Image: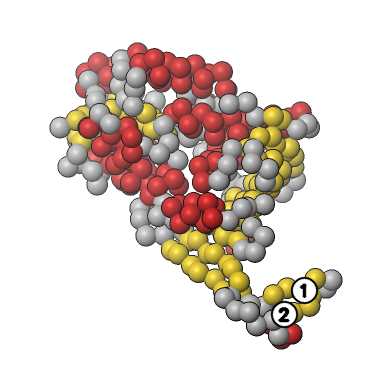
Amino acid sequence: MKKLVMIGCDAVGSYHLDNLMKLTHLVELAGFCDLILEKAENFSKLAGSGKAYTDFRQMYDEVEPDMVFICVPPFAHGEIEFETIERKIPFFVEKPIALDMNLAKEIAHKIEAAGLITAVGFQCRYSSLVPTTIDFLKENPVALVEASRITNLPQAPWWKDKNKSGGMLAESTIHQLDIIRYMFDEPESVVSQGAFGWVNDPDMTVEELTTTMIRFKGGALGVILSGCYATHGASYDSNITFSARDKRAVHKIIESLEIYEKEDSDDLAPDRFVTKGDGVLGKDIKSRKYDETDDAGLICDQTFIQAVINSDPSEILSPYSDALKTMAFALACNESIESGKRVNISY
């Protein structure tokens, strides 16, 4: 049986541990590493296997793992990946993959040279709603994409320091950025603005609210709202709307998909329309709703594990090389906030 180890035994690590404990028929959970030994020991206890470490190199030496899950904060990438690649260990890494494009590109080049199997934690790509949304996008020329991710302030102590987290766009809303890229089109340029004034934390350097305008390579435009100012679920929001001329699809990530379109009717009687303000809106609208049916996170983790077992990465939907493009998208937004200018995205 293949041996799996994990580096980073905190919040996102717990998410993956829950999944991995359902997959022990495929892999042995053989080691856990964290700078705080008690956290690694707790993971080992929960898993019922594996030794706890504070030094990932020592863990690699002793366990000789077949694969590793890297679940560290955004600012901690680099040394771990380089050592893992040097030892030719396939790895799954949580997003964001880095906060510096030069570092991420160097890691990507070394992965390619080593021929390693990799995956990045964009589990939203494995949602049961994605194929139906992609079908809608193939059949309908979309002019406008509107997306939002509004949440509360994450509690990780490093999160509110933008130099450590990358900010809301790079650390959280990156899921929206990624799934838009995956399902729809590559962004060509962005214009972003940031604002403060609601959280009232003097140590906060992450923008509490950002707005981003996007021009896609295919000609469509987009708007993304991103914020961490909410104090209650009533203010939370997380969805993507794809608008064509006669219909629209509202994709709520790993939750639901609603498609709004016109009724199949030639009846143009006056009572089928309503005048509101200076516009005339059709009342002949029907909708179709699809609910999430899969555990996308579990599928994401299992797909990587099966890829390593079978030496076949073809089923992995987000290898490091593609996640690099999502990182470029997010960091271009941050660059626009800082410069106040439009930024063309370089892939």
Q: Amino acid at mark 2?
A: Phe
Left or right of 203: which side holds 15?
left
Residue 139, by quadrant, is bottom right
Q: Mark 2 highlights which residue? A: 273
Classify residue 73 as left or right of residue 296: right
The residue located at (57%, 60%) in the rendering is 249
Spatial separation of the CA atoms under disc 1 and disc 2: 7 Å
Compared with 109, 248 (above or below) is: below
Whether 94 is drawn above or below 271: the answer is above
In the current view of this chain or complex, which residue is farthest to the left? 1
CB atoms of marks 1 and 2 within 8 Å: yes
Residue at the spot x=74%, y=79% of the render?
274
Q: Quadrant of residue 345?
A: top right
The spot of residue 11 in percent (x, y) is 42, 41
Q: Mark 2, residues whose alpha carbon is within 10 Å: few (<14), some, or many (≥20)?
A: few
Q: Which residue corresponds to mark 1?
A: 280
